[in-house]
Amino acid sequence: MIDPKVFKAYDIRGVYPSELDEDGAYAVARAYVEQFEPRRIAVGRDMRVSAPAMAEATMEGAADAGAEVLDLGLVGTEMVYFAVGHLSLDGGIAVTASHNPKQYTGMKIVRRGALPVGGESGLLEIRERALGNFQPPAERALIRKEDIWPAYVDRVCSFIDVARIRPLKIVLDAANGMAGAMLPPVLERLPVEAVRCFFEPDGTFPNHEPNPLLPENRDFIVQKTLEEGADFGVAFDGDGDRCFFVDDSGEFVPGDFATALLAESILAREPGAKVIYDVRASWAVPDTIERAGGTALVNRVGHAYIKHRMREEGAAFGGEVSGHYYFRDFSQADSGVVPFLLMLELVSTRGEKLSEILRPFRERYFITGELNTPVADVALKLQELKERFGPEGRVSHLDGISIEADDWHLNVRPSNTEPLLRLNLEARTPELMERRRDEVLALIRA
């Protein structure tokens, strides 16, 4: 079973088994190998109940199409990306539905160099092949097990100087996702007191959904960080490739503020490096990058676009408001574990509380966060926004519409998957932010 609508902008995701089942996974893997002709690929899977059977079908499809398969077993998505880069493979497939609810399954596909396969880079061709018919397989290639763990742990730990880490107290919420498997061998090397929450990988998600972007899934990490008197808290998504921070005062750290801090860490090591950030971000990001001597490059949203631009520019780091952080020295891929380690080092070496480190951002940059509104006619609304607010500042169409005035700016972009407009707005004062937010939302919702 394979419903054509499971092919999204950057990956494959659908309800198991009604929209995507083992036969569908087999077809996708065969189509991928026939389309790109990789000789050796890695396949890994998350902790979802359907994942073992889905991964098995994926490996069979790839092997039947002639690719040797390295079976990584139960691993986080970033470990598949790492394996592809580290072992110089031709590609890889992570069988995961990331942060989606428990009834979902999915696949993230990459080519050589861990370059993502998305709607504009081959996923539509894979869809056409997967929905067609296959010839009987000529000769089946080999499937063998590969242990990527020791090399992976060495690599993520290489991003910091472990000797500089202080014995901080950290609350970690793995949400019964892959971070619960990935973090223990890393924590063994660190002198921290880790309060481990929901570390047992369990695809039924008995405690809360593994999507920390939703406020109801963040309640736990906020309360637990305060209750423990921890230095900070970290919540991970289902497949472990994104992390979200809560400071010592229990306040959620917006992804753009985290991007600014992580950029500072990277630039301290590599002065003058290029850093990519997305169009939704606070002014805190380019301001911080430039102050630290780096080059700030704005980019459209989405991991396929950011990874491509990082290669093009030789950028050391990229950050998105949504909690995706990309590292050149990690196959240009996103990681949830590396940002956690960098934040640990940052708080250790600054000798200040995270809330104090963030205070200059919170006092200077006033952001709405992302506000979503369903609309009947996306193009018409974007045109109305341009006519109404465009004369006040510089207009860009890099991704949706961005308008930048001296004391406020906005980005409004359409969702890839539904008739929604997503607003991010920032101003120099809280009063101006609220007034502009209300004016823009009134026009969008009129």
Image: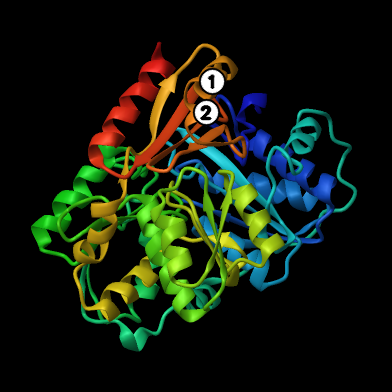
Badge 2 amino acid: Gly
Give the residue pinned by disc 2: 390
Q: Is residue 418 above or below residue 10?
A: above
Q: Please report contact status of discs 1 and 2: CB closer than 8 Å, yes or no.
A: yes
| Element type where label 2 sits in the image | helix
Q: What is the x, y in percent for residue 270?
A: 53, 78
Q: Is residue 144 visible?
A: no
Q: Residue at x 84, y 46 (%)?
A: 34
Q: Residue at x 64, y 48 (%)?
A: 305
The answer to which of 443 and 375 lies nearer the viewer is 443
Q: Residues within 10 Å of mark 1 (few under 14, many from 20)?
A: few
| Element type where label 1 sits in the image | helix
Q: Residue at x 51, y 72 (%)?
A: 149
The answer to which of 405 and 283 lies nearer the viewer is 405
Name the quarter where the N terminus is drawn.
top right
The answer to which of 315 and 397 lies nearer the viewer is 397
Spot the residue most to the bottom. 163
Q: Residue 14 occupies which quadrant of the picture?
A: top right
Q: What is the x, y in percent for residue 443?
A: 41, 17
Name the quarter where the C terminus is drawn.
top left
Give the residue pinned by disc 1: 387
Q: What is the x, y in percent for residue 251?
A: 20, 51
Calculate the distance from the C-alpha at mark 1 to the C-alpha at mark 2.
Answer: 6 Å
Q: Determine whether, in the image, residue 353 is placed left or right of residue 140.
A: left
Q: Determine whether, in the image, residue 394 is placed left or right of residue 194.
A: right
Badge 1 amino acid: Glu
Q: What is the x, y in percent for residue 418?
A: 53, 23
Q: Is residue 205 above or below residue 129?
A: below
Q: Residues within 10 Å of mark 2 (few under 14, many from 20)?
A: some
Total numbered circles: 2
Image disc number at residue 16: none
Q: Is residue 254 visible?
A: yes
